């Protein structure tokens, strides 16, 4: 296996021959991850005059992330100021108290679990911990008077009910007397086995959803708490069910809390329940009241400021296509009547929402590669755009006369913006990456629409490389998205550096939203039902052909890559659709055998929703739609990259595909990242993320442009 000298690769391979182009700016390279800063978790002060946000930066010295709170004036005056120096990757979720004098946020310090902290702003001073629970605390929400905070914490059944704790040790003598007293001996054996498993050694699995993102999970259910907003106050738990309770929000009078609850509707384990309801419970404790909507999973409820309405997000799980439906924003009367869909007529998925003043509701949706910000009146559903164009509003808040948001755009990967409530007087408040952007070449996203094999219109984008001149025909890098119902475009931030690194390495970059993608309505989502392979693959290949037809790339020098579902699609294309087309391919954390994926992943229900049953019920489809079935056709040199703790797509399938290619004598390399799960390329260890991008570039260079030594 080739070893990658990262500094040499970044400084010579990627920058070769580019010093005189693009106004002498150097190319962006994967190592620039350490120079980039991203903003998230926007929170406005009650008067709208200032905004707090989280800034994240990768630290090469510690191979971790620094996440801290910053504050800026929304009128653009002054200089943004750092509020915390936690150096904790878990810092986030800031919320202002109703009087604007305090800030609640979540942070994990000294390697412990995340807790809720309070930062006094009016009088100054250090942040202090509001909670100190061994189970941690997340999602703080201030009560209307600012005297209490609601939050959630995940507990095991034993932690929920102290009477279930059995501290008995096995009596060895009783076990030996099995012939004399079988009942006593069996009780002693059971006591010993319970004690052995107390620290997950061995780990006993009895639940359906036993896989987390990076490991095997025991039963742990999120519960709702309320705590007085003063030092050393004792939290009061409002819920106690062996099911998840999430996203609490206060009623405007502070008398109750509303949240989502996945309480089972029948005599079965909570893992089997796929619907969730809204529940209202007195803030002082008492009997909960359920607001149910049959056939839907309901989440993220919030009261309007006047208490007349509740807005929430729902998903139609009783649909024929339960995994290919929009997340719908709904407004209903607080008593559970008169539901009205806000985003249903738009045929788009909501991504976030907040109530604004004067009877307005603000929200974002996925739409044709962008994430625009809308608003509508509650008494007259008629959405109007507040912030639109080729960009993505990644988080936002509304207070006073101000709306503020974080934004991704092709030329600026992350900054904080503010505007008037109707979107006018927009201004950029931060310059997070200006010093880097002043020195590097940033390729623009050029939109193109094209017709696929059956006439369907597909949206794509092309990026010209740093050294592009008309007629030069550089190599082509085709990027594909996962999901399968994800959406790429100028509003998607996670791929920005990888795209720009390939453009900086001299590649024309093409990416698109083939059928099945989000942002184009439910018919598009459902168009790949029971057929993940050929139709979307042909959409991608025809799009790449359209780039070649424009003379923007060399048809003899093409490379292909994608992650998750697109790792599947990468393998599918080189095995089934175009075994001879690409000089190199890189499959990232892919799915290669659908039956293995169903059995060994935490996304097994996605198979059932997408293919209409379980593998033994859909055996022909599971076999035919698996790239492993067609592995003997592969001729393209393939780089496989996978996290060893990836439980979303499971490394077992990657191992099977790699072994098959090795037995067949095909050119393949398998890169395994320890300690990494499915989020490797988005939030994995910084050194792994850099290595991951560099290996893709090096693999392409090795096989697409072997003349470069």
Image (spheres, rainbow, N blue to C red):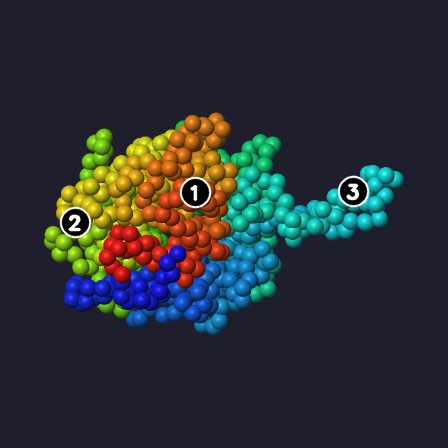
| Disc nearest the viewer among 2 and 3 | 2
> Which residue is denoted by mark 2 in the rendering?
552
Secondary structure of the residue carrying numbered label 3: helix
Residue 20: assigned label = none
Secondary structure of the residue carrying numbered label 2: loop
- 87 vs 112, left or right, is left
Percent across and percent down for residue 471 are 11, 52
> Which residue is denoted by mark 3 in the rendering?
187
Q: Residue at x 52, y 40 (%)?
A: 262
- 469 vs 499, left or right, is left
Mark 2 neighbour class, 10 Å CA radius: few under 14, some 14 to 19, many 20 or more: many
In this orientation, which residue lies closer to the viewer: 435 or 399? 435
Residue, far right: 180
Quadrant in the picture for the C terminus: bottom left
Percent across and percent down for residue 693 are 34, 57
In this orientation, which residue lies closer to the viewer: 670 or 646? 670
Whether pointer 2 and pointer 3 mark residues with C-beta atoms closer than 8 Å, the reply is no
Mark 1 neighbour class, 10 Å CA radius: few under 14, some 14 to 19, many 20 or more: few
| Disc nearest the viewer among 3 and 1 | 1
Percent across and percent down for residue 646 are 47, 49
Q: Is residue 149 visible?
A: yes
Q: Residue at x 81, y 42 (%)?
A: 185
Q: Earlier in the sequence, mark 1 or mark 2?
A: 2
> Which residue is denoted by mark 1 in the rendering?
663
Residues under labels 2 and 3: Cα distance?
A: 75 Å
Whether pointer 3 and pointer 1 mark residues with C-beta atoms closer than 8 Å, the reply is no
Q: Earlier in the sequence, mark 3 or mark 1?
A: 3
Residue 86 vs 252, above or below: the answer is: below
Residues under labels 1 and 2: Cα distance?
A: 38 Å
- 705 vs 627, left or right, is left
Residue 704 vs 83, above or below: the answer is: above
Residues under labels 3 and 1: Cα distance?
A: 52 Å
């Amino acid at each position: 296996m080739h070893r990658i000298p990262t500094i040499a690769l970044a400084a010579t391979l990627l920058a070769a021959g580019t010093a005189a182009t693009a106004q002498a700016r150097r190319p962006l390279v994967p190592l620039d991850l350490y120079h980039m800063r991203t903003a998230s978790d926007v929170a406005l002060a009650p008067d709208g005059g200032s905004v707090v946000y989280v800034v994240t930066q990768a630290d090469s010295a510690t191979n971790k992330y620094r996440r801290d709170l910053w504050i800026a004036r929304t009128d653009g005056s002054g200089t943004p100021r750092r509020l915390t120096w936690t150096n904790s990757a878990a810092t986030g979720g800031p919320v202002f108290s109703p009087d604007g004098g305090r800030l609640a946020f979540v942070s994990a310090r000294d390697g412990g679990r995340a807790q809720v902290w309070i930062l006094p702003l009016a009088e100054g001073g250090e942040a202090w911990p509001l909670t100190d629970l061994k189970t941690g605390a997340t999602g703080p929400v201030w009560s209307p008077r600012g005297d209490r905070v609601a939050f959630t914490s995940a507990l095991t059944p034993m932690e929920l009910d102290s009477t279930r704790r059995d501290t008995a040790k096995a009596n060895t003598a009783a076990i030996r007397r099995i012939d004399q007293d079988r009942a006593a001996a069996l009780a002693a054996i059971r006591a010993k086995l319970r004690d052995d498993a107390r620290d997950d050694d061995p780990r006993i699995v009895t639940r359906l959803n036993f896989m987390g993102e990076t490991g095997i999970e025991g039963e742990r259910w999120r519960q709702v708490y309320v705590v007085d907003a003063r030092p050393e106050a004792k939290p009061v738990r409002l819920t106690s069910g062996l099911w998840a309770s999430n996203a609490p929000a206060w009623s405007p009078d502070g008398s109750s809390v509303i949240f989502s609850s996945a309480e089972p509707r029948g005599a079965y384990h909570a893992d089997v329940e796929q619907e969730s309801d809204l529940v209202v419970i007195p803030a002082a404790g008492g009997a909960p009241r359920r607001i149910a909507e049959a056939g839907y999973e309901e989440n993220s409820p919030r009261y309007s400021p006047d208490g007349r309405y509740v807005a929430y997000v729902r998903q139609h799980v009783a649909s024929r296509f339960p995994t290919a439906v929009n997340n719908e924003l709904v407004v209903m009367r607080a008593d559970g009547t008169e539901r009205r869909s806000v985003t249903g007529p738009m045929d788009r998925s909501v991504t976030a929402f907040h109530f604004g003043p004067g009877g307005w509701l603000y929200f974002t949706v996925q739409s044709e590669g962008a994430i625009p910000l809308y608003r509508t009146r509650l008494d007259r559903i008629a959405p109007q755009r507040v912030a639109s164009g080729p960009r993505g509003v990644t988080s936002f808040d509304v207070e006073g006369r101000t709306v503020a948001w974080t934004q991704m755009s092709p030329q600026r990967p992350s900054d904080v913006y503010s505007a008037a409530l109707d979107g006018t007087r927009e201004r950029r408040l931060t310059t997070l990456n200006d010093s880097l952007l002043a020195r590097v070449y940033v390729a623009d996203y050029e939109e193109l629409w094209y017709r696929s094999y059956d006439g369907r219109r597909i949206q794509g984008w092309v990026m010209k490389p740093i050294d592009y001149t008309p007629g030069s025909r550089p190599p082509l890098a085709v990027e594909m998205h996962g999901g399968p119902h994800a959406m790429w475009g100028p509003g998607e931030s996670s791929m920005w550096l990888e795209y720009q690194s390939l453009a900086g390495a001299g590649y024309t970059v093409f990416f698109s939203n083939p059928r099945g993608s989000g942002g184009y309505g439910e018919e598009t989502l459902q168009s790949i039902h029971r057929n993940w392979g050929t139709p979307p693959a042909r959409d991608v290949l025809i799009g790449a052909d359209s780039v070649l037809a424009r003379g923007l790339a060399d048809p003899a020098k093409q490379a292909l890559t994608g992650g998750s579902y697109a790792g599947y699609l990468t393998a599918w294309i080189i095995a089934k659709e175009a075994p001879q087309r690409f000089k190199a391919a890189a499959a990232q954390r892919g799915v290669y055998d659908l039956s293995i994926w169903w059995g060994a992943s935490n996304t097994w229900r996605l198979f059932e929703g997408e293919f209409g049953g379980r593998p033994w019920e859909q055996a022909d489809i599971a076999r035919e739609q698996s790239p492993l079935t067609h592995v003997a056709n592969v001729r393209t040199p393939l780089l496989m990259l996978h996290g060893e703790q990836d439980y979303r797509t499971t490394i077992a399938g990657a191992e099977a595909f790699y072994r098959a290619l090795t037995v067949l004598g095909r050119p393949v390399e398998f890169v395994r990242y320890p300690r990494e799960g499915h989020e490797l390329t988005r939030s994995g260890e910084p050194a792994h993320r850099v290595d991951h991008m560099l290996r893709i570039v090096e693999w392409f260079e090795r096989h697409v442009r072997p003349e470069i030594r």
